[in-house]
Amino acid sequence: MSSVETSIGQGGDFAKGPAGVTPYDTSPSGLGLNPTYLAPSSSATATVSTPSGTVVALASWPPSSPSDGQIAILQLSSTYDPVGGKAIRWSFAYNASDGVWDFTGGPPLYAEGVSLGSLSFTNSYTSLTGFPSLVIPRAGDYQIGVGGIASAGSPYSAAFAYSIGGGASSDSDAGWLNTVSSTAAPATGYADREKTGISTSATVQAQGRSASGSVSITVQHVWLKVTPVRIT
């Protein structure tokens, strides 16, 4: 009769019989009630499922027949990134009750003008030389930010704002720059607001105006940011 070997397993002692004989669990926890013992394998690996949204190109957006809470990633071409020149990815979750895709993550669209020199500001908003613009990739609601750094040799009050789709800029959307001294120290102005119902392919154009009449202002930096809130 063949001898029986004993080895220590994860659950206690396991009796090993001759080849072809299934061993029994003799550990205190098993009490010999479970006739099957599967020895651990060094090559075994646990499989963990990591949820991941489907990447969808702009031309194919939106995904068909979405379910509430479904995650999808909208990929924009590098033309939407005039500074970095890279593709941009935005993550969205479908909101079935409103029939829209709520923004859940990703970088804003960003454009800027740097070291633009002395520009002539007037009382009316104008798309001044070098002022940046961005294009809305998909209809929806967006948070738009505009700002700038500028200086002049005399006191002035000026604003940076933006037009949407060729419409008029508004002081209520503007970042204001105000100086009270005659020095050329730069001033900074910035404003950030949510704008609803913007159409696909609408251009957001940064503009400037003066509240001090016609004045030459040296613009060191002007920038524009567009972040989605929800899209169709």
Image (cartoon, grey):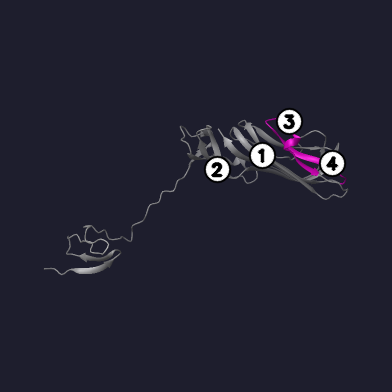
Please rate how many residues cluster around mark 1, counting C-alpha atoms within 10 Å: few if below 14, some from 14 to 19, many from 20: many
Q: Are marks 2 and 1 in contact (CB under 8 Å)?
A: no
Q: Which sits in the foreground, 151 or 13?
A: 13
Instruction: State which region is magenta.
Output: 153-177
Q: Quadrant of residue 173?
A: top right
Q: Disc 2 marks which residue?
A: 104
Compared with 64, 146 (above or below) is: below
Question: What's the distance in space between the residues labelled 3 and 1, CA to CA?
Answer: 15 Å
Q: Are marks 3 and 4 in contact (CB under 8 Å)?
A: no
Q: Are marks 4 and 1 in contact (CB under 8 Å)?
A: no
Q: Earlier in the sequence, mark 2 or mark 4?
A: 2
- The residue sitting at 74% across, 34% down in the picture is 170
Q: Disc 1 marks which residue?
A: 144
- The residue sitting at 57% across, 35% down in the picture is 231
Q: Amino acid at mark 1?
A: Ile
Question: What's the distance in space between the residues labelled 2 and 4, CA to CA?
Answer: 42 Å
Percent x, y for residue 169?
Answer: 73, 33
Please rate how many residues cluster around mark 3, counting C-alpha atoms within 10 Å: few if below 14, some from 14 to 19, many from 20: some
Q: Amino acid at mark 4?
A: Ser
Nearer the camera: disc 2 or disc 3: 2
Q: Disc 4 marks which residue?
A: 216
Q: Disc 3 marks which residue?
A: 168
| Residue 170 lies in the magenta-colored region | yes
